[in-house]
Amino acid sequence: MTRLAAPLAALFLSVAAAAANPACEEDRFEGTPFTACTVDPGAEEIRLFYRTDDGALIGSFSVLADRLAARGRRLELAMNGGMYHPDRRPVGLYVEDGRELAPLVLSDGPGNFGLLPNGVFCLRAGRAEVVESRDFAARAPLCDFATQSGPLMVEDGALHPRFLPDSDSLFIRNGIGVRPDGRVVLAISDAPVNFHRFARLFRDRLGATDALYIDGRVSRLYAPVLGRADIGFPLGPILGVLGPAD
């Protein structure tokens, strides 16, 4: 590829991704590469997937994409949608099509999920919000889809109080944020990063006033507009954005 062709190819990819629904970008934040996609829940269908109607684990982006294609739908974007036990059961609250399949957990504990505050990502009536778990319990909103995870990285513009700028706990991480305009931002780091920087990515670069950590070592993204379809061990919940089949 010539010196001129390489920048033009990169520009074409950036323009194509920005024009797509949802809009995705590959960039860097303070030296750390990341991929982020922005979705309008009022215009695009966002939902969670876990098991089939007969109880079989979906477990992967490819299985989900094939199942949707058989029903005349297209998987436009997906990522792992919540923490899960070894048998792939959701760790905290999980709601699918208005049915609660796993209960809300309010206790603290070991691991990232128990690093309070944690939170719930709730989808209802074309809107999305990230709500602190105890506030969620008090309000008891009716969600069409919901997944609980933790820690709550950004709450009303403030970072989680236990995040340290110089922490050496570095992992590939993914999360969900909601911007003041109501749009949802899905992001994954493409290199190991600590919580403090990853939270600031959502707040300071992606404009999310509330952001929820989803997971670390199992973090994966499916973004056909970028030619990306991460693979790995079977997943529990999957967050997907749907479109009509071509």
Image (cartoon, helix red, strand yellow):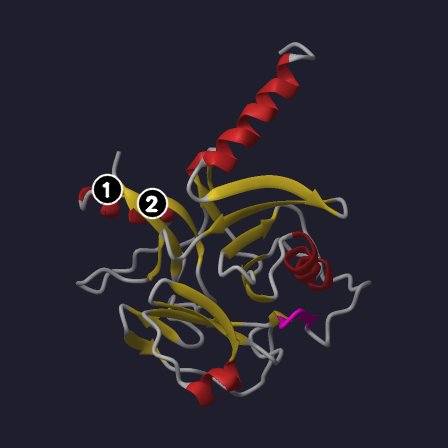
The residue positioned farthest toward the top in the image shown: 2
Going by the numbered disc 2, the residue's amino acid type is Leu
Mark 2 lies on a secondary structure that is strand
Going by the numbered disc 1, the residue's amino acid type is Ala
Give the residue at mark 2.
Answer: 75
Is 241 on the left-hand or right-hand side of 220?
Answer: left
The residue positioned farthest toward the front in the image shown: 181
Near-viewer residue (84 or 82) = 82
Is 159 on the left-hand or right-hand side of 78?
Answer: right
Residue at the spot 27% in from the left edge and 62% down from the top edge: 51
Q: Quadrant of the N terminus?
A: top right
> Magenta region, mostly helix, strand or loop?
strand
Q: Position of residue 34 (x, y in %)?
A: 63, 46
Is 214 on the left-hand or right-hand side of 101?
Answer: right
Q: Position of residue 88 (x, y in %)?
A: 38, 66
Task: Give the residues in magenta.
Answer: 155-159
The answer to whether any part of residue 139 appears in the image is yes
Give the residue at mark 1.
Answer: 69
Mark 1 lies on a secondary structure that is helix
Residue at the spot 23% in from the left edge and 60% down from the top edge: 52
Q: Position of residue 185 (x, y in %)?
A: 53, 55
Near-viewer residue (15 or 47) = 15
Q: Quadrant of the C terminus?
A: top left
